[in-house]
């Protein structure tokens, strides 16, 4: 007799459990199952099938008709890619066409985090063999293309040129033309002229297969290289200035300073150095290879030539001299006696010569007072003409304001007066403040660029805007940038001649500019030893040459250097020696 087999079937709609006992079927409620229930179950299955098919049809309609265009685009995107091409940044040339900065495409093979620079021919061979590519990683790695920036002078022109780095979120927010792919100029002319140098990125439209390999190029929009800059700078002179400044600043242990060489007739900056600097082609390496504490304490990214602010000391005395002559209260025949020292109240006013060895210069007129940098004379001059006369001339000559040089970060400096002192310190302006201002001390602050502009005015009789970029080549069009006269007739001709005469005497025997006593050429100069609240004085020296027809000015400052003639003077002498040897004749 066959064995009975029992099992349950769960229905989709009526929830009834059925049992099969032998050949007879019973309802779980106890009665045999009838034909009416079977018909009802078949209808349900038919309805369910129709519903499912309907859902699939509706979904297919939605995908192909309602969202058809969008989905076709997505499908194309799976096999078509847009690959950006970084533009090559424009070149930077010196005034003679020598390259100072350029860009090139580099091909890098990357494997397991290790990078190797390869040539374009190697790229083609690796792609031909399927070993590596820009579009996929092969057995030897993946190839990436970068645009590198090369600076031919390294640290020697760091503050003139600046450097570049990848765009950051702040750059993207500030300039809608900048993309994540771009490099952006930092400092120097790289920053000022970034929009011209940067260029326009291109793009490739490529087709790839299922595993991402490039099949073909469907279209290409070539990148457009950035514009080129022609500077006023002389590359060879720039190197000479850097070497001379570095040698002297390191020799005395200061390690900080700035130097500027300028054409007084046009305002062209022929050389500009801030020391210490940095390697613009290897910013990270500049920090890694140095003692970090001393590196950052010396502020290598500060462009001291335009953003360092210092008491000018005696290099300011020509301004006081012109102020005195303009006031009419001082003439070429005005005399003051150098008494060595005197007191105003309980404040001692002393001449440097008396302070160093007890010497006195006797009775002096203005030209000899400039040559001897006599403090007593200029104390009395300031007492005679007052603070307003000095400030008026200083402002005329560009102090307390930006010169307008085409570099970022220029500072204003400060020409103080009674209103400023009351607002700043809640104190009145004293007669002693005026006397200190007369010799460039007290609250007076200047940048080396302002001193360079001032001595250029004395040399040429015109106040010129200093500038670094003489021309821009972009879109096959040259835009020339010429000299700009800021002001003329700021001082009388005879007044300027008298001040120039004093500066000529300063670099002759008996003056203070002793490094030039035996020079084979004639210059006008002014020394400066600017006292500070702490540490050694800042050493200044400024000069123009040749004296009769000036073509060049030199301004040097060495921070914490000491005496201007002894420390900064030799730097100016080395620069002018080279200039007369190589740039005249």
Image (spheres, rainbow, N blue to C red):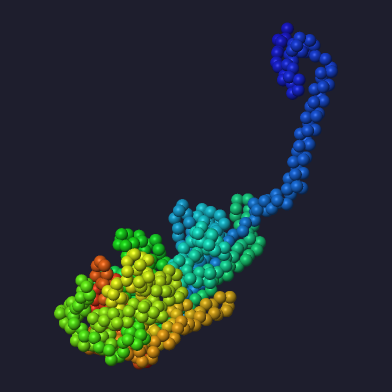
Q: Position of residue 140 (x, y in %)?
A: 49, 55
User: Which residue is pictured at 37% across the width and 69% down the height?
Assistant: 420
User: Which residue is pictured at 69% across the width and 53% down the height?
Assistant: 73
Taking the image as shown, residue 103 lies to the left or right of residue 42, namely left
User: Which residue is pictured at 42% across the width and 66% down the height?
Assistant: 281
Question: If the image is split into quadrants, where does the N terminus sit?
Answer: top right
Q: Position of residue 585 (x, y in %)?
A: 37, 92
Nearer-the-camera pick, 180 or 176: 176
Q: Is residue 22 visible?
A: no
Residue found at the very far top of the displayed protein:
1
Looking at the rendered structure, the number of numbered marks drawn on it comes to 0
Nearer-the-camera pick, 92 or 405: 405
Nearer-the-camera pick, 486 or 409: 486
User: Which residue is pictured at 32% across the width and 82% down the height?
Assistant: 385
Q: Is residue 287 visible?
A: yes
Taking the image as shown, residue 557 lies to the left or right of residue 346, namely right
Residue found at the very far left of the displayed protein:
358
- Can you tell which quarter of the image residue 584 is in? bottom left
- Can you tell which quarter of the image residue 348 is in? bottom left
Taking the image as shown, residue 385 lies to the left or right of residue 479, namely left
Q: Position of residue 278 (x, y in %)?
A: 37, 67
> Considering only vertical position in the picture, is 458 above or below 82?
below
Nearer-the-camera pick, 303 or 111: 303
Q: Position of residue 580 (x, y in %)?
A: 34, 87
């Amino acid at each position: 007799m066959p064995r009975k087999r029992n099992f349950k079937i769960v229905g989709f709609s009526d929830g009834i459990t059925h049992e099969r006992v032998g050949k007879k079927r019973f309802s779980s409620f106890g009665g045999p199952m009838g034909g009416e229930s079977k018909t009802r179950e078949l209808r349900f299955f038919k309805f369910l099938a129709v519903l499912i098919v309907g859902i699939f049809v509706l979904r297919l309609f939605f995908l192909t008709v309602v969202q058809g265009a969008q989905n076709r685009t997505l499908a194309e995107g799976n096999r078509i890619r847009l690959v950006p091409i970084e533009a090559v940044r424009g070149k930077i040339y010196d005034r003679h066409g020598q390259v100072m900065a350029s860009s090139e495409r580099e091909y890098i093979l990357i494997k397991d985090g290790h990078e190797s620079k390869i040539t374009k021919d190697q790229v083609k061979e690796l792609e031909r063999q399927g070993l590596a590519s820009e579009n996929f990683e092969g057995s030897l790695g993946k190839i990436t293309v970068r645009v590198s920036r090369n600076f031919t002078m390294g640290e020697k022109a760091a503050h003139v040129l600046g450097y570049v780095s990848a765009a950051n979120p702040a750059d993207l927010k500030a300039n809608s033309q900048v993309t994540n792919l771009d490099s952006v100029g930092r400092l120097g002319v790289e920053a000022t002229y970034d929009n011209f140098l940067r260029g326009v990125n291109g793009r490739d439209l490529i087709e790839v297969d299922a595993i991402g390999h490039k099949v073909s190029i469907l279209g290409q929009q070539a990148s457009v290289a950035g514009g080129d800059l022609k500077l006023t700078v002389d590359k060879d002179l720039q190197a000479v200035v850097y070497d001379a400044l570095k040698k002297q600043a390191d020799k005395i242990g200061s390690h900080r300073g700035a130097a500027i060489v300028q054409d007084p007739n046009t305002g062209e900056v022929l050389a500009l150095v801030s020391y210490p600097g940095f390697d613009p082609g290897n910013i990270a390496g500049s920090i890694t290879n140095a003692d970090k504490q001393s590196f950052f304490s010396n502020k290598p990214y500060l462009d001291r030539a335009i953003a360092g602010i210092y008491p000018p000391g005696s290099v300011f005395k020509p301004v006081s001299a012109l102020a005195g002559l303009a006031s009419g209260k001082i003439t070429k025949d005005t005399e003051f006696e150098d008494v060595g020292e005197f007191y105003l109240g309980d404040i001692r006013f002393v001449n440097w010569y008396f302070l160093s060895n007890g010497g006195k210069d006797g009775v002096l007129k203005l030209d000899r007072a400039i040559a001897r940098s006599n403090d007593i004379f200029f104390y009395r001059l300031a007492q005679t003409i007052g603070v307003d006369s000095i400030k008026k001339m200083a402002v005329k000559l560009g102090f307390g304001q930006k010169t307008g040089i085409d570099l970022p970060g220029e500072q204003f400096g400060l020409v103080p007066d009674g209103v400023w002192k009351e607002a700043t310190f809640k104190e009145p302006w004293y007669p002693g403040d005026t006397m200190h201002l007369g010799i460039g001390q007290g609250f007076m602050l200047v940048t080396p660029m302002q001193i360079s502009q001032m001595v250029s005015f004395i040399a040429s009789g015109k106040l010129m805007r200093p500038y670094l970029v003489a021309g821009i080549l972009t879109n096959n069009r040259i835009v020339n940038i010429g000299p700009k006269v800021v002001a003329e007739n700021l001082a009388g001709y005879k007044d300027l001649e008298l001040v120039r005469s004093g500066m000529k005497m300063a670099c002759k025997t008996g003056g203070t500019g002793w490094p030039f006593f035996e020079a084979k050429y004639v210059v006008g100069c002014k020394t400066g030893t600017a006292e500070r609240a702490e540490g050694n004085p800042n050493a200044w020296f400024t000069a123009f040459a040749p004296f009769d027809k000036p073509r060049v000015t030199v301004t040097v400052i060495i921070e914490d250097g000491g005496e201007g003639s002894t420390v900064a003077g030799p730097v100016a002498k080395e620069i002018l020696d080279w200039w007369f040897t190589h740039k005249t004749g």
